[in-house]
Image (spheres, rainbow, N blue to C red):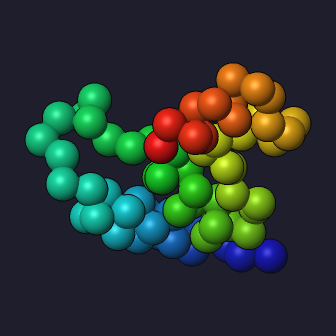
Amino acid sequence: MVDESVRTQQIEEALKHALARQKVEKVAELDLTMLAVAIEALIGLEPVNPIDPEGDGLTSSELNAANDL
């Protein structure tokens, strides 16, 4: 088990690196999904698939949206 202060520091570092990869001028431009994936990867959770954020399988509308990418 990782000490809470160490985990907090690791999350801060992950956020710093994830934010550095995003060239944004406004908070509204941040890709929060990418940040969530970076943090989830750090703490060992299965990352969220941005195409299927609910994790319940792709619906027709999600498949259509994925095809538009």
From where the camera sits, is residue 16 visible? no
Q: Nearer the viewer, residue 45 or 65?
A: 65
Residue 39: horizontal and vertical position, in percent? 57, 59
- x and y percent of residue 8 in the render? 53, 63
Rendering coords of residue 47 (x, y %): 69, 57
| Foreground residue among 67 and 49 | 67
Q: Front-most of 28 and 8?
A: 28
Q: Quick check: can you spot residue 47?
A: yes
Q: Residue at x 28, y 64 (%)?
A: 21
With respect to residue 32, does 13 lie above or below? below
Residue drawn at the location 32% of the way across and 41% of the way down:
30
In this view, 7 is above or below 34: below
Q: Residue furthest top?
A: 61
Judged left or right of residue 46, residue 17 is: left
- Which percent across, then down, holds residue 33? 51, 45
Quadrant of the frame with the N terminus: bottom right
Q: Would you place residue 24 above or below residue 23 in this image? A: above
Q: Residue furthest left?
A: 25
Relative to residue 6, is residue 19 drawn left or right? Answer: left
Q: Identify which residue is drawn at 63% across, 31% down.
A: 64
